[in-house]
Amino acid sequence: MTITAPPAATRPSATATGGPALLFRRARVSRADERIFVGKLALLAVLTAVGAVLALRSEPLSIVAGVLLLAAMYTHAVELQHQCLHHSAFRRSLPHRLVGVPLGVPLLVVYSHYRVRHLQHHRYLGTPQDTEFFGFDTRRPLTVGMLVRGLFDYPRLGAVGLEVLRAAAGRWRYAHGEIAPAMRRRIVTEHLLLGVAVLAAVGLALTGHGAYPLRLWVLPLLVAVPLHFLVELPEHLLCETDTTDVLRNTRSIRGSWLSTWFTNGNNLHIEHHAAMSVPINQLPSRHEETRRYGQHVQRSYAEFYRLLWEAVRPRARA
């Protein structure tokens, strides 16, 4: 299958009569934007170090606190990786991959593979060709079972392991169209790097140091999988799935400064889809237009999850 040219992005009809202007405006990464992102990386490193220290202590409460903090940071790291794959964190292209690859390792997310599929998701959102990287398909009928399977999507981890084995055997192929040979080589290389990290963790366990990979990676990963699902879920769920208009097929959540930081602006998802290469820290200034023209805008994550409960409650009782 060959990836064809993407359909043109659809703006709301109000655009022709004084509709959103700032929302769709492109912007380049500035030196200030770059400094903000580097600051986010520094904070991630500090909090991850704190989580590691706590997780390796002997007190049970410290271990639990450390594992939970590491799970939160591994989830946050994938949201920072998301900005890297859009090349909206640095002024040059190269640092995005250098930083983006390690950000995804704890949650077993291969940077270049994620980049290819996620950019296709942006091109084809609202069409049958949509290929979101993470497996939950918001176009399918919403059921409690579907939500539970998405929440505990541990099979994805096994699927990544199989991809690593295919890469090592020279049999890895992209399943969603044709990609350039150079991109395929990048993806294969990054799968192999992930495989090396897993083997290193296994090696530690086999040499009597199993507490390190268990507390620093395995247990946080088991918590991070459902946590990441809860972050990603509001993006398009309960929105219109048969339109390419981002004001109708995507959701934004105003949120608090904490949720905006933790999700790295993923809550402002209409703003992101309207102009995906705009640095994340610039999106809050566009939220007022989103509130005015967007069809799916919530004040908080709690409000969204109340809507979700109202949608699934009749099915849960059936």
Image (cartoon, rainbow, N blue to C red):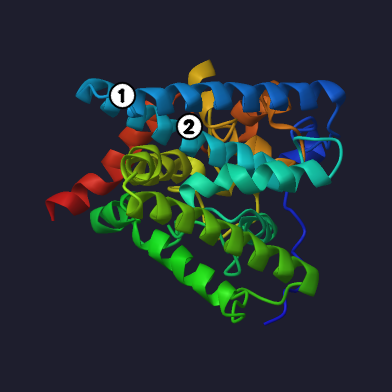
- Identify the residue position indicated by label 2 in the image: 73
Q: Residue furthest top?
A: 257
Query: Could you tell me residue 246's position as x and y percent?
Result: 64, 46
Front label number (1 vs 2): 1
Left or right: 262 as drawn, with respect to 186: left
Q: Residue 102: in sight, yes or no? A: yes
Q: Residue furthest front?
A: 207
Query: Could you tell me residue 308's position as x and y percent?
Result: 33, 41
Q: Residue 273: in sight, yes or no? A: no
**Mark 2: secondary structure:** helix
Q: Amino acid at mark 2?
A: Met
Q: Quadrant of residue 174?
A: bottom right
- Identify the residue position indicated by label 1 in the image: 57
**Mark 1: secondary structure:** loop
Left or right: 138 as drawn, with respect to 210: right
Nearer to us in this view, 199 or 137: 199
Image position of 170 with respect to 20: above or below: below
Tell me the quarter of the image containing the C terminus. Answer: bottom left
Q: Earlier in the sequence, mark 1 or mark 2?
A: 1
Left or right: 30 as drawn, with respect to 3: right
Residue sitting at x 55%, y 42%:
78
Res 47 label: none
